[in-house]
Amino acid sequence: MEIFDIVACLITLAALFGYVNHRFIKLPTTIGVMLISLCFSLGLVLFSLVSPGIVETAKSFMGRIDFNEAVLDCMLSFLLFAGALHVDLNDLANQKRLIAILATAGVVISSFIVGALIYLLLGAFGVEFSFIYCLLFGALVAPTDPVAVLGILKKVGVPRSLETKITGESLFNDGVGVVVFLAILGIATGKSDGSVGDVSHLFLMEAGGGFLLGGIFGYLAYVLLKTVDNYQVEVLITLALVMGVYSLALAWHMSGPLAMVVAGLMIGNHGREFAMSDTTRDHLDKFWELTDEVLNAMLFVLIGLEFLVLPMNGQNILLGLLAIPIVLSARLIAVAIPVTALKPFREFSKGVIPILTWGGLRGGISVALALAIPAGPEREVFLTMTYVIVIFSIAVQGLTLKPLIEKVTA
């Protein structure tokens, strides 16, 4: 019953905040729900001055939710599959070089730049953390969050080629970013010696295994879809694909996010074109769009409520604010290098570098990864810093992305 109670509370709050946003504030749903949730948390903190018990009750409720598990082990599978389902493979193939570089080398470059600069920043404040933990922080904020990105892109009207670049990168660099984080975490905690062989084995098992798993089971699901014409059964097949394959990926230590992206691309392209009737396509799209919207709303409510249980203090918040330009600068460099290198060989849309830089939003995945850091002073500082970066990313970058696009593409 505890799980039912938690989900019931989150859906109730998501519905209430979603209504208030749609009726009165009229921001994009993900941003509006998160900001209302954050204001709700701040209101509870202020109200605790009069009635201390109410915040303790709210903290107790949030303490029952494992944010890391809820996002990485549950919600992410549905959200990534739903996002990949509507990505055109032909468009993706046209942008494959840039997306591949951004999702791999871009993540690594950003991780090292952020890690090095954060090491210097913390030292200036007298916070002595090892360099490997600063790299760990760089890894958890390096990947753009597909959940946040896809939620915003639906509302801003990005040119098609740019939308494909941003969407494709965010879908793939999420899986790569988690692998990079796990590799550095293993070194930081002494579970890995950091050798080339050890790291290569992790990448091969996690990333390669995830691709293979998603491809094999995505194809099997495609074959099943092709042999039936019943939308109820076909929706169930896709649901089983998501839940079953993600569970297998976690059990076999493979990348569940990459498996979901590959499976979603296969069903959304070959499955949609060759294995579904118009009726099935309509019902499948509506089912996954609704699933995407509901889980998105719940996730951004969680992000706002997480404020109640974070170890906030003035210095950590200041460090988070100072880390924002560092993260954006690293993102700019990670985007500018491959775009500049590829410019002699192909054309790019006007304003591609500033749009990709500003459109690289961070979200719940970064917070979930920060929560995976072992308990200690590093976890406390980096968790607050990550939360500040995520709130800025979604609220400020998300709200100003459309004006930026209109300005640089005019």
Image (cartoon, rainbow, N blue to C red):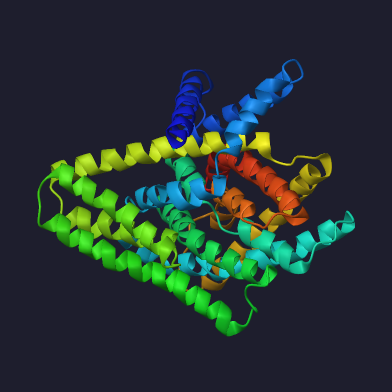
Residue 19 position in % (x across, y down): 46, 21
Q: From this view, report whether residue 44 is shown above or below residue 211.
A: above
Q: Which residue: 77% across, 62% down?
A: 117
Residue 68 position in % (x across, y down): 55, 49
Q: On the rendered structure, is 79 left or right of 149?
A: left
Q: Which residue: 50% across, 26% down?
A: 13
Residue 210 position in % (x across, y down): 40, 67
Q: Is residue 324 visible?
A: yes
Quarter of the figure that contains the N terminus: top left
Most extreme residue toward the front is 1
Q: Is residue 43 visible?
A: no
Q: Nearer the viewer, residue 72 or 2?
A: 2
Most extreme residue toward the top is 50
Q: On the rendered structure, is 277 left or right of 389?
A: left
Q: Nearer the viewer, residue 251 or 168?
A: 251
Residue 26 position in % (x across, y down): 50, 24
In which image quadrant can residue 221 be found?
A: bottom left
Q: Which residue: 53% across, 66% down?
A: 179
Q: On the rendered structure, is 245 left or right of 302?
A: left
